[in-house]
Amino acid sequence: MKVVLALGGNALQLPDGPDGIEGQQYAAERTAAQLLRLVTDKSISLAITHGNGPQVGTELLRHDRAKDVVTPFPLDVLDATTEGYIGYVLQNAFHNVVALAKEKRSFVSLVTQVVVDEDDPAFNNPSKFVGPTYDYETAMQIQAEKGWVFKEDKGRGYRRVVPSPMPRRIVELSSIRALMEESIVPITVGGGGIPVVEHDGALRGVEAVIDKDLASSLLAVELKAELFVILTQVDKVYINYKSDHQQPLERAKLDYLKELYDQGHFPAGSMGPKILAAIKYLENVDGQVAIGSLEEAEAVVRGVAGTIVYR
């Protein structure tokens, strides 16, 4: 069975864990241990994806603080930087956990470019918050100097906003597929991949952030995966989440999920992108989507926990 497994933010940072790279390594080792039986199941051809939101924010802050000493990198390069080091952290964690269990499976982290449309409407309406918070005067000064766009972030100050275009094509797809055919697990499309635009076959990076769930969905479509798994902090999808009328959604058909999405049940800042990713996958592949918690990952993949969505 071919499976694309998208890890959530809790796979790389625990609320009560240490900060910095040590915290990410600790969380990655815990994640690898929780997924051990899945990643060593040779009946599963597996690709793993992950996010990078907090890490990109940290890199932007680091480059901002050091701008008087070294020239800051553009956002697409920071996307690549974080995809590379997070991939290393996960690859190392999986290798160690598998070796300790005296099992065998190889893992390869793959820095991945994802083509977006240069005329995507998102480029005219940047909405994804990235980087540090500034007061109004400083934000406007940077905006005038660099042409960046700033918006107020829920009363906490002003932050840069960047486009979040739709992913259209995964450049390294053939390499991902070749690895999976050899029973190697690619760790790929990290943070949604590096956004690039294409002209006459040439690729150029753009300053944007692709939603990692939508990029993972595209990967599942292009691989024709039978199962697309989204692991997150909640045990399943809920209707009227955190209200007096909260209801768990354990199994749902695609059409019903579309209705709920259109009715606004899933906020853009939390479950919304995951539901949209599920919809886009099922519109293209007659497979299943499983959404659930990292702690119950094996049961989610087996279809006995979480939310299962199908045509």
Image: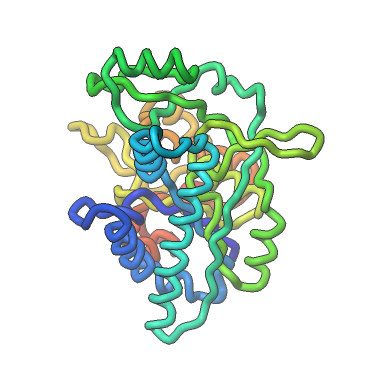
Most distant residue in the front direction:
69
Q: How many marks?
A: 0
Question: 146 or 69: which is nearer to us?
Answer: 69
Which of the image's four quarters has the N terminus? Answer: bottom right
Taking 105 as reference, is 286 left or right?
right
Most distant residue in the bottom direction:
102
User: Can residue 2 be seen from the camera position used here?
Assistant: yes
Q: Is residue 155 positioned above or below 57 on the image?
A: above
Q: Residue at x 22, y 32 (%)?
A: 245
The picture places residue 172, in percent across and down from the top left corner, at 67, 52
Taking 104 as reference, is 60 left or right?
left
The picture places residue 274, in percent across and down from the top left corner, at 44, 40
Q: Is residue 104 positioned above or below 113 on the image?
A: below
The picture places residue 211, in percent across and down from the top left corner, at 49, 38
> Residue 113's image quarter?
top right
User: Can residue 266 be seen from the camera position used here?
Assistant: no
Question: 28 or 68: which is nearer to us?
Answer: 68
Q: Is residue 133 positioned above or below 86 on the image?
A: above
Q: Residue at x 36, y 17 (%)?
A: 151
Question: 167 or 43: which is nearer to us?
Answer: 167
Q: Residue at x 40, y 69 (%)?
A: 93
Q: Residue at x 58, y 67 (%)?
A: 45
Which of the image's four quarters has the C terminus? Answer: top right
Taking 151 as reference, is 222 left or right?
right
Q: How is the image coloured?
A: rainbow
The picture places residue 61, in percent across and down from the top left corner, at 35, 37
